[in-house]
Image: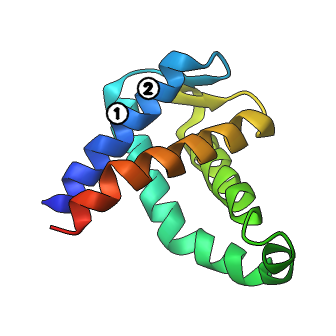
Amino acid sequence: MRWIIGLVINALILMGIAYLFDGFHISGFMAAFIASLLLSIVNAIVRPILVVLTLPITILTLGFFLFVISAITLMLTAAIMGSAFVIDGFGMAILAAILIAIIQTFVVKPMRKR
């Protein structure tokens, strides 16, 4: 149940980012929910591989390269979704990854402690 609530919260975060920024487009809540589901799957499968492959640069940048990895997973999710979820450029993906991380820190992670 918590996982589904987390997906809904992530979908709302994606919708909020799409509302605030012109370079981030999502066609509706159902597309945001599917993107949230796909993003969680990509984060579970692809992200650990990318983290291991880029470990030296992640250490050199004191962990800031993880935002680049999050942006890559967002771009991969957008590529899978097609026209329902579009990110206009890698800079927008990095900005969205940073915002998602900040919002999840204050919304989703305290929910997991219960």
| Left/right of residue 8 with respect to residue 21 in the rendered view | left
Residue under label 2, please give it: 16
Asked which quadrant contains residue 20, the reply is top right
The amino acid type, in three-letter code, at marker 2 is: Gly
Query: Residue at 21% of width from left, 53% of height from top?
Result: 4
Q: In the rendered image, which quarter contains the N terminus?
A: bottom left
Mark 1: give few (<14), some (14-19) or many (20+) Cα within 10 Å: some
* Residue 7 pos. (x, y %): 30, 49
Residue under label 1, please give it: 12
Asked if 60 appears above or below 36 in the picture, the reply is: below
Between residue 4 and residue 38, name the one nearer to us.
4
The amino acid type, in three-letter code, at marker 1 is: Leu
Query: Residue at 60% of width from left, 78% of height from top?
Result: 48
* Residue 108 pos. (x, y %): 32, 54
The answer to whether residue 37 is visible is no
Asked if 44 appears above or below 20 in the picture, the reply is: below
